[in-house]
């Protein structure tokens, strides 16, 4: 039986550690492999990607790495009009939500007489959006990464996504990128795509920041290039956690867990519940449903490796477990979800009530689905316009204003052994 219910109190310490680490534990084993690829791209540019993708097209050239205007036009012809309309509808909600996040372009306050200080916001000049591919097309990820950047005012947005055999990209991904407003789209994925955007190549421009989800190879590459460029968070495979009490609907919960498992073999789907009966019913439904499902191999891998049904002795223990796990997605299906919400400290995006399944946030409710994974929700937030702006501070001091700070600055500068710092103040009062 897959996903046999277990009590949290009965988990061995090593088992508990593995649950918390999930797929991030696998990054150590591939870190050096990814690092070699990243450094190879840094030193040798496009040729590394060319050599890698020649398995798809033996006469591959630089021109084959970029999506052309003709590719975009053909993509629109090959995508169902209903899908195009859905992407446009979703993009409107996403843009609306992210416009609400925008701060004032500038604010300032009077610190004291003659001292004005403030902060301004300026967009990044060029960003890179990583779009997962191959196992499934994710046009929604294009909307989630590019639209907030456009709202923030970024002028140049580069997208990289892994190609399929024949160096093709799913047309719906191309259409979504066009709707969202990407500047360029490249058929380069994995560490090759991340490194190319981080260091710049003859074909792919260097960016200031890289955002977007990916598998453990993408996550490792983002960690390696961090500092050379900014990154949103070291996001890995999808995580879906459901916190439920006895009021939970077993049919809803079972399909919600399965839906998260179809993302990736390393995805995590976890139910934490205070109800023994609900736990067993959900387990039985999943095991009954599994043999009939598409993408069965991917789902089975996810359910076997990183997914669990856990029983808490009370809601307090369940909430403590959720906060320690810090899930990417959290569904709250309790009798009083808004009361429960106030007790959640660590989660990427929260879905409340039985009619708020995670996929609404994946696609169309407006919130962003690029979220922190691997317990990084303890210190990172989901992607937002804040990821695409800088916030430099400024100050203006009159001579009287500087005079009011003179003694303080001179005293502290001299105490730190920096006499020229003190002199910059004293010089102005000779």
Image: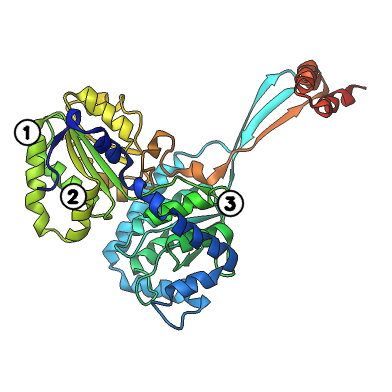
Residue matched to label 3: 228
The Cα–Cα distance between marks 3 and 2, rounded to whole angstroms, is: 38 Å
Mark 1 vs mark 2: which is more N-terminal?
2
Residue 424 image position (x, y, % from top left): 84, 28
Q: Secondary structure at mark 3?
A: loop
Q: Residues within 10 Å of mark 3 (few under 14, many from 20)?
A: some
Above or below, 382 against 140 in this view is: above
For residue 96, say whether it is visible: yes
Asked whether 366 or 342 is in front, the reply is: 342
Instruction: Tell me the number on the disc at residue 277.
Output: 1
On-image quarter of the C terminus: top right
* Residue 98 position in % (x across, y down): 43, 43
Q: In the shown orientation, is residue 217 left or right of residue 224? A: left
Q: Which residue is mark 2?
A: 258
Q: Looking at the image, do the residues carrying marks 3 and 1 touch, with CB atoms under 8 Å apart?
A: no
Frontmost residue, 54 versus 396: 54
Question: Residue 266, image x and y in percent?
Answer: 29, 52
Residue 93, disc: none
Q: Are marks 3 and 2 in contact (CB under 8 Å)?
A: no
């Amino acid at each position: 039986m897959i996903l046999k219910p277990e009590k949290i109190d009965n988990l061995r310490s090593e088992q508990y550690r593995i649950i918390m680490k999930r797929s991030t534990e696998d990054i150590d084993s591939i870190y050096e492999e990814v690092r070699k690829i990243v450094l190879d791209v840094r030193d040798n540019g496009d040729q590394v990607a060319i050599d890698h993708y020649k398995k798809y097209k033996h006469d591959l050239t630089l021109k084959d790495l970029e999506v052309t205007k003709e590719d975009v036009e053909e993509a629109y012809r090959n995508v169902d009009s209903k899908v195009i309309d859905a992407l446009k509808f979703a993009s409107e909600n996403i843009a609306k939500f992210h416009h609400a996040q925008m701060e004032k372009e500038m604010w300032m306050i009077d610190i004291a007489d003659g001292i004005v200080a403030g902060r301004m916001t300026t967009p990044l000049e060029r960003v890179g959006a990583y779009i997962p591919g191959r196992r499934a097309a994710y046009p929604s990820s294009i909307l989630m990464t590019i639209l907030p950047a456009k709202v923030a005012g970024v002028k140049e947005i580069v997208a990289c996504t892994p190609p399929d055999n024949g160096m093709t990209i799913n047309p719906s991904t191309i259409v979504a990128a066009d709707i969202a407003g990407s500047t360029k789209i490249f058929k380069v994925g994995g560490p090759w795509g991340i490194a190319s955007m981080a260091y710049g190549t003859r074909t792919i421009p260097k960016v200031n920041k890289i955002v977007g989800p990916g598998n453990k190879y993408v996550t490792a590459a983002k960690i390696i290039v961090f500092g050379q460029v900014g990154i949103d968070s070291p996001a890995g495979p999808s995580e879906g956690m459901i916190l439920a009490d006895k009021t939970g609907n077993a049919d809803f919960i079972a399909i919600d867990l399965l839906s998260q498992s179809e993302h990736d073999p390393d995805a995590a789907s976890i139910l934490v519940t205070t109800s023994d009966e609900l736990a067993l019913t959900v387990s039985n439904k999943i095991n009954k449903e599994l043999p009939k499902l598409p993408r069965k191999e991917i789902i089975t891998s996810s359910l076997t490796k990183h997914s669990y049904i856990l029983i808490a002795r009370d809601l307090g223990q369940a909430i403590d477990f959720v906060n320690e796990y810090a899930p990417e997605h959290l569904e709250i299906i309790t009798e009083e979800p808004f009361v429960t919400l106030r007790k959640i400290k660590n989660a990427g995006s929260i879905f409340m009530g039985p009619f708020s399944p995670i996929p609404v946030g994946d696609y169309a409710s407006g919130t962003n689905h690029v979220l922190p994974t691997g317990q990084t929700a303890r210190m990172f937030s989901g992607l937002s316009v804040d990821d695409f702006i800088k916030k430099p501070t400024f100050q203006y001091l009159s001579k009287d204003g500087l005079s009011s700070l003179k003694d303080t600055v001179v005293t502290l500068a001299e105490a730190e052994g920096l006499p020229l710092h003190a002199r910059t103040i004293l010089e102005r009062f000779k």
